[in-house]
Amino acid sequence: MTPQLQEIEVKPKQPWKPTQREINVNIAVFIFNTLLTLAVVQFTGFSGKLAFVVLFIVISLTSNYLVAFFKGGSVLAKNTLATGFALTGISLLIMPVISILGTVFAKGTEAMYIGFFTDDMSQDSFASDLDVGGIKHAVLGSLIMVTIALLLSVPIGILTALYLTELKGRGSTLIRFLVQAMSGIPSIVAGLFIYSALITGSGRGFSAFMGALALTILMIPTVARTSEEVLKLIPSDLREAGLALGATQWRTVAMVVIPAAKSGLITAAILGVARIAGETAPLLFTTGGADALNLNPVDGNIGSVPFYVWKALIDGSPNAIARAWAGIFLLMIIVLCLFIAARKIGSPKKVRS
């Protein structure tokens, strides 16, 4: 008779997982650092939130280094110190972002009410009560200009990227240099160029189309450079396969390369829109601004969300400042949604088995 073997469940070891004793030590060190920082701030000349943060970082790095040194020697202490500096850098990067988001959310919702998105400022001033007036004219104006800029810059940017990656003809180095140089152009220069060349130079007035041209100058480099990097990621085997089947180079590009890079090119367009969504300086010189709704893209002054925020800040009254925060909050939501959409579209698709 064969004896039955008893099954023993073996749990895999996880040396990277801290033990309960190590967790308790870390908690004790954190409490000690906090209390020591409070004591230093209380009994010395240091005061304020900034002083507390700086002292807490210095004390935490020092105490963690000493604990690691007595526990595992100089090697563990150096690794702990390096990890502490890395976490400090990440914290200093995240804390301002969280502070900005919290401040904009807290102050941006004060001026919002039911008619905020359905009314304009044609009958009210920025100093009026917060239950009248709205941002409809600015939102629709920004939408018109961004749409025109999108229709102009995306084809130019993608064709430029295709020339640089597929044709690689004469002048590719110069074109790439010019695209990179355009990325560093201050936005106010683009506005001044359109203002001097088209508005005053040719006698044309302010309009949404003029604003869109200035935004197009700023958007093209983002679309072109992002599209170029996306096209470089397409394997050359796909191009060679298309050419081996007898297709011309441009047919291979149109039927193979572009479909393979579709999600990346869409991401490039979204990032381009996010680049220009909050621009204010070029619109000051090209649109003239307006408090009433104007749906004509080629004639008349037109409002925009950045111009709305700028004009509210110029007013300076408490209600106007609240309206400015509401406009900033709306811009932040739009830009965040664009970046989330770009992240979602550009992420690799999971293949179901």
Image (cartoon, rainbow, N blue to C red):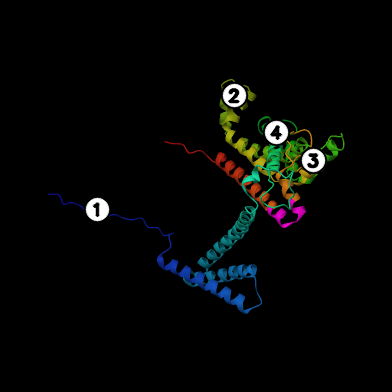
Query: What residue is pinned by disc 2?
Result: 243
Amino acid carrying mark 1 in the image: Glu
Q: Quadrant of the C terminus?
A: top left
Amino acid carrying mark 2 in the image: Leu
Residue 7: image tag: 1
Mark 3 / mark 4, whichever is N-terminal: 4
Amino acid carrying mark 3 in the image: Thr
In the image, is 176 to the left or to the right of 65?
Answer: right
Question: What is the C-alpha distance between the residues marked 1 and 2?
Answer: 60 Å
The structure residue drawn at horizontal position 87% and vertical position 38%, both measured from the top left corner, is 200
Mark 2 / mark 4, whichever is N-terminal: 4
From the viewer's perspective, is residue 169 above or below residue 113? above
Query: What residue is pinned by disc 4?
Result: 160
Does the image show residue 21?
Answer: yes
Which one is in front in this view, the residue at disc 3 or the one at disc 2?
3
| Relative image position of residue 40 (x, y in whole percent) | 60, 76
The majority secondary structure of the magenta stretch comes to helix
Q: Secondary structure at mark 1?
A: loop
| Relative image position of residue 97 (x, y in whole percent) | 62, 56
Which one is in front in this view, the residue at disc 3 or the one at disc 1?
3
Which residue is at the front of the view, 219 or 327? 327
Question: What is the C-alpha distance between the residues marked 3 and 1?
Answer: 79 Å
Is residue 318 within the magenta segment?
yes
Q: Which residues are magenta?
A: 312-322
Query: What residue is pinned by disc 3?
Result: 286
